[in-house]
Amino acid sequence: MKPTLEDVVRPDMVVGGYRIEKKLGAGGFGKVFLAWRDGSPCALKFIHLESVGEWGWRELFIMLRHEFPNVVRLLSHFKWPEEKPEYLVLVMEYVPGVTLYRWARDNNPCARELVEKLLPLARALKEVHAKEVKHRDLKGDNMLVREADGALVLVDFGAGTMPGAPRVTGALAPANLRYRSPEAVAFFLRENRKRGERYDYTVKDELYALGVILYVLVTDVYPFNGPDDELMAEIRAGKPKPPHVRNSRVPPALSNLCLRLLANATARVPDAEALCKALEKLLEEAKVDPHRWEMALCYGWTADGRTTDDAPELVGKDPQAWLRRWIRQKPKRGRPPPPPVAPAPPIEPPALPEPPTASTVPTLRTRVRRAVPLLVAVTVVGLVLGVVNVLGQLRPTPPVPTPSPAPGQPVLTSPVPAEFSFGGPMPWATHVHEVAPPWKPPEADAGAAPSKADTPAPVTTVTLSSGTTRMKKKAPGSQAEREKKGNGSTGANVLLAVAAAANMACPGAQVRKAPAPQACPAGAVETMTRQLGIPIGDMGGRSSFPGWEKRKPVPVKEGPFSLELEADWDVDGRTALPRGTRLSGQLCIGEKRVYGLITQAVTPTGDTFTVCMELREAGIERGLEIRPDGEAIRVNPFVEVRTVNRFQ
């Protein structure tokens, strides 16, 4: 096997007079290493001459001709090794910092801070475009927030172009499809396109890409997403949901600017100078209405809940809408809190035949604390109804024989008044004795609730815990035997009725539409952060489901699953998990999304680690959107993996 660049270029090695310290990252045209010379740091970009050398010479040509503000500087260049060159090495200014998206995720900025961050970049692009240079690959990963002063620096002109630069582009310049303009997509899909015809990339294409970046920054999602064919259709249609509709914290004026950047070519912001003026105007507006512009655009990790006091748009809404908005639709930013030092002490529910497991009780306790008023109200009403029903049955009359339940019928049912049905499960309301951890399939433990069809709202199925108290089906006996059975323990009858009443307020796992929040497997967070060196919230994992070659949604099923990393998971230039690492866990199918909960990583060499990771789509939203296709559940085959400190 031919050695890779990482096999050849190692820490402390001297290349062209520069001492290598570590790998910083990789892109489509080269790999970048941090190096030192005469006590000063720099970034060495290695571009393979045989495979992508034309792109390297193109980038060198642009960087040699011009030097722009807020654009990484070229310091030198050489070919390496000297005796038989294989690489073009660009010596670039080293910019310590994080990508723009990572900065937003870690710092949870307000709208004003975003505008202040983007304005210098818009001014830099004004200078770049004035020299007829175009970057052609604007995205969050190619913008670094400098650690020293917080300035935004544009990097990687590998796909750039300018008059006189070598022509190496095909029909379209290489770039991420999500950032393509409608006119570029229309050109690519045009049936009568001539052989060898190239798309004429313009300043408006750059501005469209900036619109995508701004949309992600203010909403935490891409304006359009999905498989390539669906994505291109949505881009051409050009009807994104307005940012202030998707996220009510976005000022309308900023939302309108974002939509103008994403508009069709004739209605789009014409150039970088016009964009600068628009951003300057927004900063003036921010002074007039500081409350709206100073509010963080997303919720922080320290916020346990949301009330109607800080969300007036939720006042008067029905409970289901309020709960779903409150619990499931809160994009979070900021640095996640450190994992708890020790788990909360278990709670012993007196009315249940089995004590709760250690992994389930803290989760229930946390959920209940977040919604005490609503949970208490619903539970009390349910208990009262159940007890009243029992008391009515305890009057001194002979027991009335009742037929035994037929096979397949629930053991005990109890009607729920319509006014107490919220039309869906509450994420915190689960059976503490029957739910398997999310990292195990439902059949992994004897006490795990079996898979069932959703129970209609007016009917609740009672399932006792495993063990001697579990109710078992028996063949129908004589009427005398049933009467004798009916005269049994009153306490057992009360227990069943109370359990049924509790189920009214707490739907079981069989009707849950999404996996309930759960703690990570024991030791997973410490393994990821300390042993592997992957910080919580990192999204360096890339993978795909089998069948991705067709670039169409692929079918998935609930239960155990495994995927392989398609590239090294790098952190600060160091490989934390190598390519080919197998990630395994559980797929949970919700109402609209499929959730992948990953609990184990096995490297190609056999090293096994307990982890806590989730599948993401486009690196933004939790879970994978379900693509309707008859009875099959299909999802986008391309996924990203994110480390978490809790499944939620």
Image: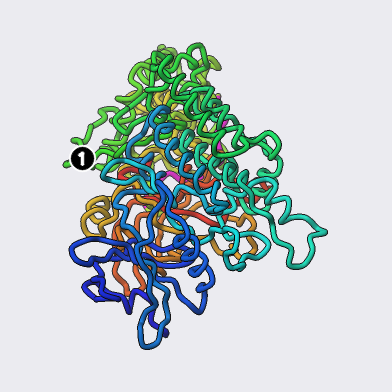
**Tag 1, which secondary structure?**
loop
Q: In screen coordinates, is 246 left or right of 228?
A: left
* Residue 419 visible from this viewpoint: yes
Position of residue 3 measured from the top left corner of the image (x, y, whole percent): 38, 82
Q: Nearer the viewer, residue 383 or 219?
A: 219
From the image, which quarter does the C terminus lie in? top left
Q: Please, is residue 286 above or below residue 361 in the view? A: above
**Horizontally, is 177 left or right of 422 in the view?**
right
Instruction: Indicate left or right for 638 with 12 as reference.
Output: right
Mark 1: few, some, or many residues within 10 Å (few <14, many ≥20)? few
Q: How is the image coloured?
A: rainbow
Q: Residue at x 67, y 43 (%)?
A: 234
Judge by depth and name the residue closer to the eye, 448 or 192. Answer: 192
Q: 302 or 88: nearer the eye?
A: 88
Which stretch is magenta?
Answer: 445-457
Q: Residue at x 74, y 63 (%)?
A: 197
Q: Is residue 375 above or below residue 83?
A: above
**Image position of 430 with respect to 394: above or below:** below
Across and down, in percent, residue 452 comes to 53, 43
Quadrant location of the N terminus in the rendered image:
bottom left
Q: Main secondary structure of the magenta part?
A: loop
The furthest residue to the bottom: 83
The residue sitting at 48% across, 24% down in the picture is 282
